[in-house]
Image: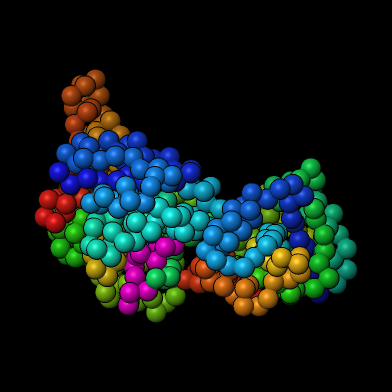
Amino acid sequence: MKRVGVLIFPGTNSEEETLRACQAVGLDAALVPWTEEPRVVREFDAFVLPGGFAYEDRVRAGAIAAHDRLMTAVREGAEAGKPVLGICNGAQILLESGLAPQLDGATRAQAGFTRNAPLGKYRSSHVYVKLAVQPERCSITASLPQGVILPAWASHGEGRLAARPDVLERLERGGHIAFVYCDETGATTAESIPNGSALGAAAIVNERGNVLAIMPHAERDAWTYMHHDATRERARGKGAAMLAPSGGIALFSGLAAALSAA
Amino acid sequence: MIRCLEVALAIPDNEARTALATLQRLGIALHGLERADLYRCEVDDGAGDGLVATFSGLETVYNPNKHVLRVRESARPGPGEVWIDEIDAEPSRPQAEFVRIAGRTLPGVRSLERFTAWRLTDSAGTPAAGDVVAAATETLLCNAAFQKATR
């Protein structure tokens, strides 16, 4: 069975729920601390970088972790075509490391998730994101329906996509904006974007399509009790209904499908 | 009139130490790295003298138990220094931030820019050479996608 490494840096804090979401879709997933031997890390078939505050966001969110030796194995894996999923702080790390969007094979950061607009405020709110590319553009979304809408929780102070105008144009034109923020109906409006992100972007995919950096936490809306609309209210008092999967689990099902197809 | 205020930690700076360790591990020939918050203010004539007192009262910016606050002689980076700010920072943000922090605007301040200043030194304790500063800036201290480095 293919194995997924859920990476932990000092300050990561979403590893347990990310691990649970991976295991819930049948993945053989394990936590991998930053102290793990590189030869052990290299044996995993896919990597998930969870949310948190790796290295306390020192210098910039994700900047120190991007240079952690653990990332050497992730970089090698990404170059070999292994799926890599970064969520929230994990997404920030992927952009700081240059693994996404990696235009023209660049090895340096070409974009970043920086302070929310307006006023750089931390935001924790329930959001929806819509698949904005053809599913097969990214191996992790290849099994999802076209235009699928996923629920998730935005929980960040630095989630606004920022890059030079020419890079933003290439991201849009080249199909790198994998998910955009939207409302429950799939409409992207100013109100549905929680952080002022350029192009309404919630997720970036690399050129090759195997590295996905997504800001909102799908793993925090993976079961009904985590959900935040009438579905949860209808399930209240019904244990089995509360424990039923909700929309966010689809992201992890996508990862499982990508590994099965590999 | 331009006034530049520097707020630096008087206690060990864990962020600077982490950045230094990372840069050294990546092969950048550095011996020391210091960090400070800079506030470059355009002030009305005669308003500059009260600026230090005003900043001293902003307790989320300056804590006398752990910070040193001083007026810099120059409003430009010195040798071995690089200043980092965001390319698309909202122009009103610093002022709005102060409004929120202090519950009032900074008297006599027309505009304010905020930077993170990094001061790099070599093994002799002197300012690091330009190529070393450039390498550290490109490698870690500045994400050129959305930040600007001034040296």
Image-quadrant location for residue B25 = bottom right
Residue A206 picture location, percent across and down: 29, 66
Q: Residue at x 63, y 72 (%)?
A: B133
B111 to A158, vertically: above or below: below
A176 to A40, vertically: above or below: below
Q: Residue at x 30, y 72 (%)?
A: A172
Query: Magenta stretch containing residue A11, yes or no?
Result: no
Could one spot residue B59 in this view of the protein? yes
The quarter of the rendered structure image containing the N terminus of chain A is top left
Q: Residue at x 25, y 46 (%)?
A: A4
B149 to A243, vertically: above or below: below
Image-quadrant location for residue A241 = top left
Colouring: rainbow
In this orientation, which residue lies closer to the viewer: A35 or A215?
Answer: A35
Q: Is residue B46 left or right of residue A123?
A: right
In this orientation, which residue lies closer to the viewer: B86 or A117?
Answer: B86
Q: Is residue B147 left or right of residue A35?
A: right
Residue A250 picture location, percent across and down: 20, 46
Please give the range of residues in magenta: A94-106
Could one spot residue B43 in this view of the protein? no
Residue A187 picture location, percent across and down: 26, 58
A16 to B98, vertically: above or below: above
In this orientation, which residue lies closer to the viewer: B82 or A177?
Answer: B82
Query: Magenta stretch containing residue A95, yes or no?
Result: yes
